[in-house]
Image (cartoon, coloured by chain):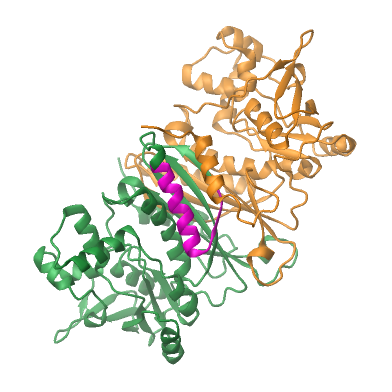
Chain colours: A orange, B green
Amino acid sequence: MKRFNEKQILGLITSKLGNTGLEPLFGKDDISVISLEKIIKKPNKNCYLSATCDMLVEHTDVPPRMTFKQIARKSLVSCLSDLGAKGIRPKVALVSLGIPLSLSKGDVRGLINGFTLTSREFGFFIIGGDINQSKELVIDCCMLGFSNNNLNIPRRNGAIVGDYVIVSGPFGYSSAGLKILLNDSKTPNNLFKKKSIESILNPLPQIKFGLKLSKYLSSSIDSSDGLAASLYELAKESKVNMLIHRDKIPIPPELNKFSILNNLGLDDLIFYGGEEYHIIGTIPKKNIIKVNYLVKKYCLDFFIIGRVVSGIGKVFVTYPNEQKRLLKNKGFTHLT
Amino acid sequence: MKRFNEKQILGLITSKLGNTGLEPLFGKDDISVISLEKIIKKPNKNCYLSATCDMLVEHTDVPPRMTFKQIARKSLVSCLSDLGAKGIRPKVALVSLGIPLSLSKGDVRGLINGFTLTSREFGFFIIGGDINQSKELVIDCCMLGFSNNNLNIPRRNGAIVGDYVIVSGPFGYSSAGLKILLNDSKTPNNLFKKKSIESILNPLPQIKFGLKLSKYLSSSIDSSDGLAASLYELAKESKVNMLIHRDKIPIPPELNKFSILNNLGLDDLIFYGGEEYHIIGTIPKKNIIKVNYLVKKYCLDFFIIGRVVSGIGKVFVTYPNEQKRLLKNKGFTHLT
C-alpha cells in the first residue's frame, strides 16, 4: 500500500484548497490571515483574523514523564508559538479532546487544570470545544488572534538578500531534554539536566519577542520542526540562500560536554532538535538599531546567526577556520 | 479507576473556563459567539464571530461502508449543522487531521476530495489545518461564521411558555440507516433502505432552514444527539417543560414496518436516534404566520410537534387516546 508523507498530503491539500482568494498575503504559512472586510459584506475595514490550529497526538507528541497538566499546556503552546512568531496576540481558542477510556478522573482534572493555567498565563480565552472518546489522547487546539492590519505580519517568504538571520534563544536544550527523557542520557550537571527537561515538559512560546519585534522582521517562523528545517523553510519560500555562522548560534554552555558524554553529534543536537518554540526570522539591516533598542528595553534574547544571500533556497553553515558546508535539510523526528 | 463521562467533563470545563466575559449571551451552547468589539481594542461595532468545533473519531463516528470522501464530509457536517441551527452562515474552517499509517494514498485523496466538495457545496473556505500521525483516523474541524449582530441568534435557553416546538424534518431514517449498516437489518422496501443509508453516509445539515428561519425561533439546537436529548436540552436550559404530540412528529411512512420487521421499538427509532442533523427549536406564536410564509417561499420542511408549557425541564409525550408519558432522557449512543 502506497502512503503519503506529511509534506505530500500538505501539497495535495494546498493544490486542492489553497487559493481561497481570502488570503492575499498568506498561502502556505503557519497561520492564516483573512480580512474580515472580505468576509462580512458590510465595510469593516482594518479588521483581520489570524487563525492557526495544532493537533497533539499522544503516541507521537507526549514524551515520558509529561504530566496531564503539561500535556494540556503543550497542546496550546504549539498554537501560541505559531501566532507569537507572527506577532499576533492570541485571543481565543477552541479545544477538541479525544479522550481514551484509560484516563482517570484525576488525569482529566490535570488536563483541564493545564488548559486553565495556560490560558491565564498567556491571557487568552478558551471559548469552545468538543469532547470525544478515542483510542489515544488527542487534543486539537484552534487559536485565533485579531489585528487592525496585516502589513506588519512577517511571512515565510519575505527574506531579502542582505537581511540578517536571527533567533530568539538557544538551541540544544530541547533535543538534549528529549534524549534525557527517552534514553536517560548522561548529563554534565544537574542545572543542564533540569533546564533541558524543563524545555520539553514546559515549553515557553516566544510571545513577548513576537509582539515586540515581529513587525521589524522581513520573515519569520517558529522553530517547532527544528532549526535546520525552519531555516530551509524561510530560504525556500523566500527564494534566497542563507549563510549561517555556526559559532554565532546560541547554545547551552554544557551542550558540547553532553554530546561527548552520550556520543551524539553536537550539530545534530543544535540543528535537528525540534519543539524549541523559538522564533527564527530575518531582519533588514535598517531595522537593527531600532530592534537593538527594543531588545534592551524589553529584556529579550536576540541573536544574529547569519545573513541572507542570493540563491534558490539552500542553507550553508560556516565553521571557524573551515569552508562553508551545505546544511542537511531534515526535520525533527517525532517520538515514533 | 474512576472515570468521568462526557457530561461530567463538560461540567468541569465549564466551571473552570466557562465565564470568559466574552460571551454575554452564550454559556453552554453549540456555538460560541463573541463580540469583536470586545476583542479588538478599537471600536468595531456590529461584528460578531461565531465559532464551533467538532472532532470525528474513527472508531466511534465512522459506520461501516462509509467512504473516505463521506468521512471527510461528515466531519464538516457536524460543524455546519451547529452553525446552521443558529442561523450563522459558515464562512471559514480549519481542519486538523490525525492520519493512521494504515491509510493509503487513495484513502487520503478520498478525504481531501471530500473536504473540497463539501466546502464547495456549502460555500465556505478551508483556510488552515494541521497534519499528524495517529493510531486511528481523527478529523477535527473548527468552523467560523460572522454576523453583524448577535440579537437574532437563537440560544438553547430562549424557549418561553406558549411557544410551539418545531423540527425541520423527519426522524427515524438515521437510526434505521445505522442499524442497516451495522446489523444488516431487514427493510420494508428499497427506497426506504436507500434513504436510511443515505441519511447516515451523506447527512444534510439544515443550513437553508437555519439561515431563513432561525431569527424567528426563540430557541434552537441541532439534533445530532437525538430528538429526545435535544428536546431535553432546550427544556432544561430554558427552564420549561415540553409537551410533544407523538403523532405530529414527522416520520418515514415505512418506519413502523421496519420496527416490526426487526423487532425494534418505534419510539426508540424516533426519539433515540442521532446525527439526523435536523434543527429542533421553539417559535413564539406571533411568528407563525411569517414563518409559514417563508417556509412556502423557500420550499422548506417545517413541522410543529408540540408546545412549551411551564415546568422545570421535563419532556412529556402524548399519544392518541392515551395520557401523557414522561419521555426518557437518553442520548444517541455512539458506535462503541
- Give the x, y percent position of residue A139: 46, 44
Instruction: Determine if the magenta segment contains residue B126.
Output: yes
Left or right: B53, with B106 as reference point: right
Residue B13 in view here: no
- Give the x, y percent position of residue B245: 25, 82
Left or right: B68, with B176 as reference point: right
What secondary structure prevails in the magenta region? Answer: helix
Instruction: Determine if the magenta segment contains residue A134.
Output: no
Q: Quadrant of residue A198?
A: top right
Residue nearest the viewer, comparing B103 with B320: B103
Q: Quadrant of residue B248?
A: bottom left
Q: What's the residue at 60%, 63% (across, down)?
A: B22
Q: How many marks?
A: 0
Residue nearest the viewer, comparing B258 with A51: B258
- The stretch in magenta equals B107-129
Residue B22 in view here: yes
Tell me the quadrant of the picture where the N terminus of chain A can be found: top left
**Quick check: B273 above or below B316?**
above
Q: What's the residue at 28%, 81% (across, down)?
A: B243
Residue nearest the viewer, comparing B229 with A274: A274
Tell me the quadrant of the picture where the C terminus of chain A can be found: top left
Residue nearest the viewer, comparing B89 with B162: B89
- Give the x, y percent position of residue B64: 26, 50
**Quick check: A173 above or below A203?**
above
Q: What's the residue at 59%, 17% (across, down)?
A: A190
